[in-house]
Image: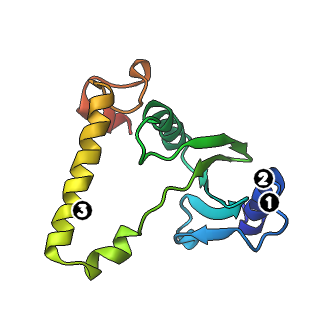
Amino acid sequence: MREIDAIEFIRRRYGLADVDSIAPVGNHRLNRNRVYRFEKDNKHYIFKLSISKYKWENEIKAHHLLKELQFVPETLDYGNLEELQFQLMDRKEGRDLFVYWNRVSCRAKKNIVKQMGVSIASIHDIHKYDHYGWWEESKGFADIIEYRQYK
């Protein structure tokens, strides 16, 4: 799908007046997922086109399972668009760690890592998973080696 087609889809589906408010995020030349951000009615959104249906299904499921955690984006809309899958999420406030990391002190980095650990722990506290692959146990693998070979 061409970039202009994706932007036009976003404009029409979410009732945006023009395409100038839709900004690509990341490096679209790598031909991986395409991510865009836009604002409407003073709210910020992230729109993602996924190449992998497997990863898209897992991400949608993860957002639903973890929705009570404040740092997990809420999935507001999702579906299929030609050969790709799309997802609309609310945009969480924060800084781009990739840019920010080299600008902070060692002490600040330790604090960031600690906050990340607390966040990961809160994900693990939501539910116990004893399988690999999908969020749904019926689709998952009990053995990580078997899962890796499948992948």
For image coordinates 20% across by 69% down, the residue present is 109
User: Residue visible at 27% across and 80% down?
Assistant: 102
The residue identified by callout 1 is 11
Q: Nearer the viewer, residue 45 or 130?
A: 45
Residue at the extreme top: 138
Question: Which amino acid type is shown beneath numbered disc 2?
Answer: Tyr
Image quadrant in which you'd find residue 130:
top left
Name the side, left or right, on which 151 lies relative to 14.
Answer: left
Task: Choose top left, top right, bottom left or bottom right for residue 10.
Answer: bottom right
Local SS, label 1: helix
Q: Quadrant of the N terminus?
A: bottom right
Q: Earlier in the sequence, mark 1 or mark 3?
A: 1
Residue in the picture at 57% in, 72% down: 29
**Distance between mark 1 and mark 3 Cα atoms:** 36 Å
Residue 80 picture quarter: top right
Disc 2, SS: loop
Q: Are marks 2 and 1 in contact (CB under 8 Å)?
A: yes
Front position among marks 1 and 3: 3
**Residue 107 vs residue 35: left or right?**
left
Total numbered badges shown on the rendered structure: 3
Q: CA distance from mark 2 to mark 1?
A: 6 Å
Q: Which mark is residue 49?
A: none
120 up-or-down from 145: above or below: below
Residue identifier under label 2? 14
Residue ID at (79%, 56%)? 9
- Front residue of 23/143: it is 23
- Could you tell me if the residues under marks 1 and 3 are in contact, i.e. CB atoms within 8 Å? no
Q: Which residue is under mark 3?
A: 112
Q: Is residue 123 above or below residue 95?
A: above
Q: Nearer the viewer, mark 3 or mark 2?
A: 3
